[in-house]
Amino acid sequence: MIVRKLTASDHVSLQKLWSICFMYSINVEELEKKAEDQKEDPTGYGAFTEDGEMIAGVIGNRLTMNFDGQKTPLVGIGGVVTHPSYRKGGAIKAIMKELLTKAREDGFIFSGLYPFNHGFYRKFGYELSRDLETYTFSFTLISKYAGEVKTKLLTEKDDRTFLHPVYEAFTKRYNLAIDRNKDAFLRATQSNPYAANDYTYAIYDGDDPSAYVAFYKKDAEHESILCVRDYAFRSEKDFIKILSFLSRFSPEFGKIEIALPSDIPIALLSSNPYDVEKKVNSRYMTRVVNCEKALSMMKRYIPSPFVIEINDPFLPENSGKFRVWCGGCEKTEEKADVKMSIQAFSQMMAGYAGFDGTLFRDDVELFGNYETLKMVFPKTATYLGVYY
């Protein structure tokens, strides 16, 4: 088995592999014609037989996410596939080893993915880092917010990039939030009200855009649901403006469905919290690719130095003891205050459970400095904003 970086000539082979494994139809002739003009290499790695047949592939999307208010390199894993005839042969393990090693060398600090199976990716150092919390509630619960709100319906022909600063301001609140380039932002805020019943509204504070909301109609058994698929706001008051505007659609819809970060207390904002339904989907995993850099990047109050030992058998160069203080981090041989696996560390850095929650794991040992560690690693709300 040969593992190497994918090149432009591998586009068709990768598409054919996806077609076989994900069971969808493709037009090979059309793909081959398009491939003739395809000059850009896919950002990923493949595994090949000695005869050159592609048997597995992984895409490594080069992304940027927010970490403690800083734009931080993230390699987003996607398109993971192995030909059924070659499964159980270690192809993905070999690819992930090569991909993550190179990503670390290239300056990436975090990696993330949407797993088909959490246990499979834990073998490579990933751990659950975010729950998708989706709420469904009736319009009567937000009727108290009804009022005057200045809005504008956008169409597919309208420029929507003027809303991008709103998204930037919103996502700066949350670790893990992924940057959107122009194309990604335009896809997320697409608005085709007439042909597709897909709507994006800009919301204003005076003459300045301060929020936006994008939604579509979903038909349920006995009612229609207003499904919010994207939104952003500059401040808490601007989120209330979103609720105020959405309350106007009560004649057309029975309920609202919206996914929210955990720091937005929708039940507390509702007139009858009993009527708020919540669905949780634990669907996103991350892993730290460079522990030393991640620790040194933290913008948090650290009352006293601490030493953390991290064990990363999949990327041994990422293991070690690290002495951390306010504004810095270095490798050390000092006695550790806490010892943990890369999975536990990655989950803690994402803010998923906080240090107290991390202590419930069987791959964490605490030796001292509890108060400092508890303060430095709190449980925090997160957001993604991009599906890759």
Image: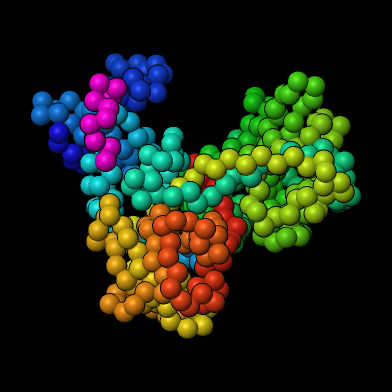
Percent x, y of residue 59: 33, 39
Q: Position of residue 244 (x, y in %)?
A: 81, 48
On the rendered structure, is 60 left or right of 325? left
Give the residue displayed 64% in from the left and 26% down from the top. 196
Q: Quadrant of the N terminus?
A: top left
Residue 151 appears at what percent x and percent y?
Answer: 76, 47
Give the quarter of the image for residue 195: top right
Magenta stretch: includes residue 86: yes
Question: For residue 259, which quarter of the picture?
Answer: top right
Report the magenta residues as a range.
Answer: 83-93
Residue farthest to the bottom, as pictured:
304
Picture coordinates of residue 202, whole percent (x, y): 69, 47
Task: Name which residue lies at 21% across and 34% down.
Answer: 47
The answer to if 265 sits in the magenta stretch is no
Relative to residue 2, is residue 71 depicted above or below?
A: below
Q: According to the image, what is the colour scheme of the structure?
A: rainbow
Seen at 39% across and 62% down, the residue is: 340
- Seen from the viewer's position, the closer of residues 218 and 89 is 89
Can residue 166 be spotted in the picture? yes
